């Protein structure tokens, strides 16, 4: 079984535009447009069984729109193939009611992208949001790290963990996109999950293996970062980690099942 823990989706009418904007942000070509149909086509090439789908609101006014899209997408794709994460924005006023609403609607947690949303992940105004998430037992997937910015680096994520030790937090991109030394320094051995997305194209395989070994296999999740990457390409990179047996099963699906209660 394969669960892709990190897949972005967008409505068909804006998918190409949204994907292009992401590509420009990272100065990188995008493999796909971000539509649901293309996600299913890409994932089918490696036999993905289930996708954790999400998107991020770049303004408070987008929060409910994005959340409603994720809810409707999960309902539209049959057989539980999609499990959704909603989103939140630091400027959204009634966050407690919205988080409760999306939880009731079946979403399992939220996704934050501080670099897109332009806020520091450990900002004091986010503490009440993290407290509500903790109380609702809703994990938060955070885009982690980018050497170009100071919004979501591993040190800031460590501050969040210090203040909210019971918060279930997933630091995407192995704890820090292009900041893996900082991830090793500040996050290894902490109670935080890493996903493999947008990492293995850049981080040397021996370094990735060392990071996984030191952090613990029970904290690692497979993710593609669709639509940036094609699943087949990501799978080829992932296989270089040479995980086998129970370690492979843990990363591909068992850790995700346990974390989200699937």
Image: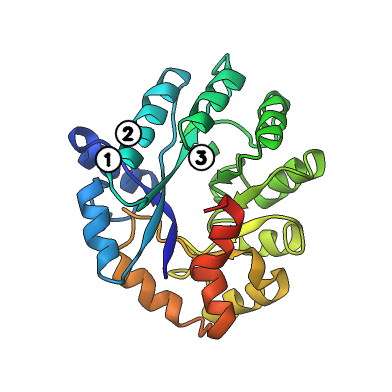
Q: Which mark is residue 72?
A: 2
Residue at x 58%, y 31% (from the top left corner): 119
Residue at x 27%, y 40% (from the top left corner): 76
As measured in the structure, the alpha-carbon distance from the residue carrying label 1 to the one carrying label 2 is 6 Å
Whole-percent x and y of residue 101?
51, 24
Is 53 or 113 nearer to us in this picture?
Answer: 53
Does label 3 or label 2 sit earlier along the sequence? 2
Task: Locate the N terminus by quadrant.
Answer: bottom left
Whole-percent x and y of residue 114?
55, 37
Whole-percent x and y of residue 116?
47, 36
Query: Does the image show residue 178?
Result: no
Helix or strand or loop: what does disc 2 sit on? helix
Marks 1,2: beta carbons within 8 A: yes
Name the residue tied to disc 3: 113
As measured in the structure, the alpha-carbon distance from the residue carrying label 3 to the one carrying label 2 is 21 Å
Where residue 224 sits, quadrant-wise, is bottom left
Left or right: 149 as drawn, with respect to 66: right
Is 21 or 92 nearer to us in this picture?
Answer: 92
Residue at x 54%, y 70% (from the top left corner): 251
Name the residue tied to disc 1: 76
Q: Residue 133 carries which label?
A: none
């Amino acid at each position: 079984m394969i669960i892709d823990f990190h897949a972005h989706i967008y409505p068909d009418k804006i998918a190409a535009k949204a994907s292009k904007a992401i590509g420009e942000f990272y100065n990188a070509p995008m493999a796909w447009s971000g539509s649901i149909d293309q996600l299913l086509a890409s994932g089918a090439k490696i036999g993905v069984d289930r996708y954790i789908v999400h998107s991020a609101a770049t303004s408070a006014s987008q929060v409910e729109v994005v959340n409603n899209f994720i809810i409707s997408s999960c309902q539209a794709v049959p057989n539980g193939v999609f499990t959704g994460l909603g989103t939140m924005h630091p400027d959204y006023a009634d966050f407690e009611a919205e988080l409760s609403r999306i939880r009731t609607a079946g979403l399992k947690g939220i996704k934050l992208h501080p670099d897109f949303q332009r806020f520091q992940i450990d900002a004091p105004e986010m503490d009440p949001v993290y407290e509500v998430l903790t109380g609702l037992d809703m994990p938060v997937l955070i885009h982690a790290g980018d050497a170009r910015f100071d919004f979501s680096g591993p040190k800031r994520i460590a501050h969040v963990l210090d203040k909210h030790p019971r918060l279930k937090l997933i630091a995407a991109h192995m704890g820090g996109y292009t900041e893996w030394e900082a991830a090793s320094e500040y996050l290894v051995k902490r109670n935080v999950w890493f996903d493999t997305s947008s990492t293995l194209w850049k981080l040397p395989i021996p370094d990735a293996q060392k990071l996984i070994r030191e952090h613990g296999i029970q904290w690692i999740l497979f993710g593609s970062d669709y639509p940036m990457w094609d699943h087949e390409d990501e799978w080829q990179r992932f296989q270089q980690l040479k995980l086998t047996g129970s370690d492979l099963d843990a990363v591909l699906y068992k850790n995700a099942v346990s974390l989200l209660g699937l």
